[in-house]
Image: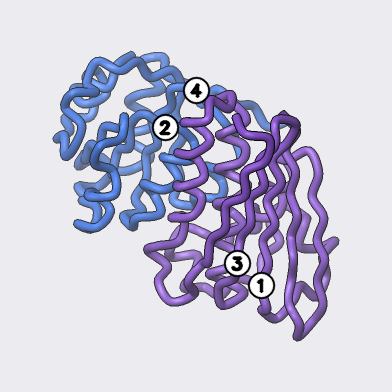
Chain colours: A blue, B purple
Amino acid sequence: MTVRDILELLDGEILLGEENLDTEVHTACGSDMMSDVLAFVKDQSVLLTGLCNPQVIRTAEMMDIVCIVFVRGKKPEAGAISLAEGRDLAILTTNYSLFEACGRLYEKGLTGGAKIE
Amino acid sequence: MNDRIVLTYHVSPEDFTRAGEASSDVKNKLKQMGVSPSAVRKVAIAMYEGEINMVIHANGGDITVEITPEKIVMILKDVGPGIADVEKAMQEGYSTAPDHVRSLGFGAGMGLPNMKNYTDDIQIDTKLGVGTTVTMTINL
């Protein structure tokens, strides 16, 4: 799945990183708690979240996350967007809820990639 | 790579939105030095959690990162309230963070456990009312 596929599956809007639309996405996580996101390293991952502050971008940066999807039509604060500029990161927004957005991607074969033991 | 590089940062307590700047800078520098991506990511995540902790709990602090060809050592020093029960603080899900911190996406009780999981060694030297020094080592 690519960032472009995610954009289409979620009827989304791209806010930043159009040059990254063809980046491959292998795994996903959905959370508003950034420490829970930081607990599992994944490769080529998309983060779906309802949290809109700059720490979402920072978390994505530390994890090498390739795409962030803000759910329920949320758009991040201006400061957050500017923090993401110049990184290999695509930022999308979708009107679907977190549950619905995750479900739509999971249905098309995207998984969490990490199992709790 | 030079034999030994030392980076120092001051973590400002005032602005939560700026938390992570030091970790971001270290990440970029390590990348430029050619450190392996997996080691860079471990350092970045562990230090970022520590930086967030400093802002949330300790009124800021100072970070020293020492890079040698063998290992990366991060020393995070604050003069905050100290950790009352280190054993509990190391448990996943245990948090003393106030509610407003949770609305910012932190305080899930994963900070110290994450720091432990991503590093090869972690030492916590803490005294109530005096402060905390966390020393984390990642072997290269």
Front: mark 4 or 1: 1
State how far apart marks 3 and 4 are (Cα): 31 Å
Name the chain letter of the residue that bears numbered label 4.
A
Disc 2 crowd, CA 10 A, few/some/many (<14, 14-19, 20+): many
Q: Position of residue B8 (x, y in %)?
A: 57, 58
Mark 2 vs mark 1: give the one in front.
1
Residue A43 - label:
4
What's the residue type where badge 3 is placed?
A: Asp
Badge 3: chain ID: B
Q: Quadrant of the N terminus of chain A?
A: top left
Describe the element under mark 3 as helix, strand or loop.
strand
Whether labels 2 and 1 share one chain: no
* Residue at figure coordinates x 30%, y 18% from the top left: A23
Q: Quadrant of residue B52?
A: bottom right
Q: Is residue B55 above or below residue B25?
A: below
Q: Residue at x 74, y 49 (%)?
A: B136
Separation (CA) of disc 2 from disc 4 = 7 Å
Q: Which residue is mark 1?
A: B78
Question: Which amino acid lies under the numbered mark 4 shown in the image of this protein?
Answer: Asp
Labels 3, 4: front one: 3
Determine the CA span between mark 3 and mark 1: 6 Å
Q: Residue A113: x, y in percent?
A: 55, 22
Q: Please, which chain is the residue tagged with disc 1 on?
A: B
Few, some or many residues within 10 Å of mark 4 (<14, 14–19, 20+): some
Q: Return the residue at label 2.
A: A65
Circle on res. A47:
none
Labels 3 and 1 within one chain: yes
Left or right: residue B7 versus residue A19 is right
Identify the residue under disc 3: B62
Question: What residue sits 47% from the left and 71% below the top?
Answer: B12
